[in-house]
Image (cartoon, grey):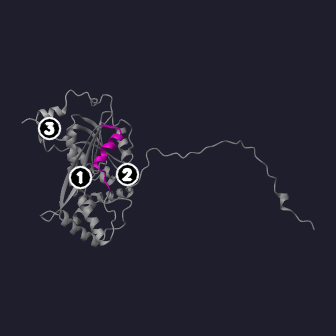
Amino acid sequence: MNTLSVRAFIPPLTRRGLPLRAIRCYAVQAPGAPTMEIFSNQHKWQQRERAAANVDASRSVDYLRDEVASRLCERVLDIKRHFPHVLDLGANACNVAHALTQPSPEEPEKGPRSTRVGKITAADSSATLLHRDADLPFNNEIEIIREVLPTSELLPYQANTFDAVFSSLSLHWINDLPSVLAQVNNVLKPDSPFISVMMGGDSLYELRTSLQLAEQDRRGGVATHTSPLADVKDVGGLLQKAGFNLLTVDVDDIIVDYPDTFSLMKDLQAMGESNAVLAREKGGIQRDVLLAADAIYRELHGNEDGTLPATFRLIYMIGWKHSPEQAKPLERGTGMFSIKDYLEKNGEGGEGKN
């Protein structure tokens, strides 16, 4: 009996004459330096949206943002120039625009500070917070354009758009701060200033140390409950790396007294300034840790009247975009007299004549 082979039904293999091409594949890095994610942008957005939804509570804790915005505007007055179009980056509830409509505390007779600004574009990623005070009277005293950003780390503006960029208490939540500063430099017109203030350094060091000691005592370890902040010695280098010239960096402290640690934490939550670190411990702080932290806070940092001081360290920075017509420092060795000789002559060098 003959067997039927399946091979008879399979067509013979044919080699297709495909041309051989030498192809090389390369790993290409995306533009910009690699970014290490420290803060959760989504969680921070949710915190700010939730806080701004309670309008009365949110406005009641604006004392810090209003005071810092007023001090920022005082630095704007030091620049004898009019700014037709200003960007307020991370505008929160337009606290800077509100402060501009008020007179300077030092010179109230000169009227509102908004005479230095034509119009202001207030940009923020939280729509609820940005439009929270859109119905208040100060909106009629200055032209405000509110724009909701899809993310706080990308600026959707063309180069050479703004005559100045302000930023008040928003940069401390940025993951890629060098990239944002470079974008700010790009959207500025030549010889235009970037005037900003951010929380940094040892802000809330009293709360940090109290929580750490309390957790070490109650749980035998320390979790991340407060956010890391930039140091003042790093800010100048970041501005210079972003391309800014004629840098000015200074530090200012605002100390606010609270009745207890719970009031401080409640206000931080109402501000939308709660912890948003990716490596944070999920869930709330245990009750025994909070009670121990309050006792430690009072023992180490408490005032005589029973209140607890909270220090907010503010880093102010001013940088100017490069321009060929910009003033430049003289080269080394071109000075006409020696500062050392001048100080010795006037008796300020320690060895001057009586």
- How many other residues sit within 10 Å of disc 2, few (<14), some (14-19) or many (≥20)? some
In depth, the one of 25 and 43 nearer the eye is: 25
Disc 3 to disc 1: CB gap under 8 Å:
no
Q: Position of residue 171 (x, y in %)?
A: 32, 49
Q: Quadrant of the N terminus?
A: bottom right
Please tell me whether mark 3 sits on a helix, a strand or a loop.
Answer: loop
Residue picked out by circle 3? 349
Residue range in magenta is 228-245
Tell me which numbered mark, 2 or 3, is placed earlier along the sequence.
Answer: 2
Mark linked to residue 99: none
Q: Is residue 266 above or below residue 75?
A: below
The kind of residue on which mark 3 rests is Gly
Task: Choose mark 3 or mark 1, whichever is in front.
Answer: 3
Disc 2 to disc 3: CB gap under 8 Å:
no
Q: CA distance from mark 2 to mark 1?
A: 19 Å
Q: Is residue 229 above or below residue 122?
A: below
Q: Quadrant of the C terminus?
A: top left
Q: Position of residue 347 (x, y in %)?
A: 10, 36
Is residue 91 found inside the magenta-colored segment of the image?
no
Q: Position of residue 238 (x, y in %)?
A: 34, 44
Write the residue at 11% across / 36% down. Answer: 352
Please tell me whether mark 1 sits on a helix, a strand or a loop.
Answer: strand
Is residue 233 found inside the magenta-colored segment of the image?
yes
Q: Is residue 298 above or below residue 124?
A: below
Residue picked out by circle 1? 313
- How many other residues sit within 10 Å of disc 3, few (<14), some (14-19) or many (≥20)? some
- Quarter of the image where one finds residue 265: bottom left
Residue picked out by circle 2? 175
